[in-house]
Image (cartoon, grey):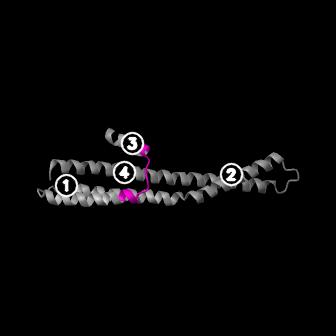
């Protein structure tokens, strides 16, 4: 293995690790958003339900309470609709699967680097194969913002 080949593989390992970390972080962030919106929607729905139940026996229900209950009910309905529309669990799974793909190629690259060989042609063929695989993973991965990549790139350089 030439020094250039070794340097290229090492750089790809670092890049794969950054992309793996980004995708898994985005998966967790997306799951957290889904959970938080779901909890907020459930809490608001519970407030509306108990408000309506509490006001059932009363003759002179305060209009402000009725309007407020209606608004809270509307917000809860909107949040529930947004959750269904955004399909956050599906997006989280896509991020997770993309992260797993980068983890797999990172392991292949580490394996190639670990078993150094003097057969530069064999290494070149493996690099070409892995480049094709890398391009395929990149094409099929859910996009990550440049801002997120830069954040994790800085963190990896600091550690």
Name the mark on residue 75: 2
Q: Earlier in the sequence, mark 2 or mark 3?
A: 2
What residue does disc 1 label?
114
What residue does disc 4 label?
19
Q: Quadrant of residue 57?
A: bottom right
Query: Where residue 71 appears, x then y in whole percent?
Result: 73, 50
Please name the residue shown 46% across and 60% down the image.
93
- Badge 4 marks a residue whose secondary structure is helix
Q: Nearer the viewer, residue 142 or 25?
A: 142
Residues under labels 2 and 3: Cα distance? 36 Å
Query: Is 36 on the left-hand or right-hand side of 65?
Result: left
Marks 4,3: beta carbons within 8 A: no
Query: Where residue 95 appears, x then y in whole percent?
Result: 44, 56
Query: Is 40 on the left-hand or right-hand side of 5?
Result: right
Residues under labels 2 and 1: Cα distance? 56 Å
Query: Is 154 on the left-hand or right-hand side of 36?
Result: left
Query: Where residue 9 appears, x then y in whole percent?
Result: 23, 51
Query: Is 143 on the left-hand or right-hand side of 83?
Result: left
Q: Which residues are magenta?
A: 137-147
């Amino acid at each position: 293995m030439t020094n250039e080949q070794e340097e290229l593989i090492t750089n790809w390992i670092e890049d794969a690790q950054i992309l793996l970390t980004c995708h898994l972080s985005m998966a967790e962030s997306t799951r957290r958003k889904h959970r938080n919106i779901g909890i907020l929607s459930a809490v608001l729905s519970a407030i509306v339900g108990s408000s309506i139940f509490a006001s059932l026996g009363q003759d002179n229900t305060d209009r402000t309470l009725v309007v407020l209950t209606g608004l809270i009910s509307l917000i809860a309905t909107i949040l529930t609709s947004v959750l269904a529309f955004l399909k956050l669990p599906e997006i989280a799974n896509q991020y997770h699967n993309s992260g797993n793909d980068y983890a797999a190629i990172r392991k292949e690259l580490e394996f190639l680097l670990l078993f150094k060989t003097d057969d530069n042609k064999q290494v070149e063929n493996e690099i070409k194969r892995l480049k094709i695989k890398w391009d395929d993973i990149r094409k099929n991965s859910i996009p990550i913002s440049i801002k997120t990549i830069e954040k994790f790139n800085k963190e990896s350089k600091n550690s």
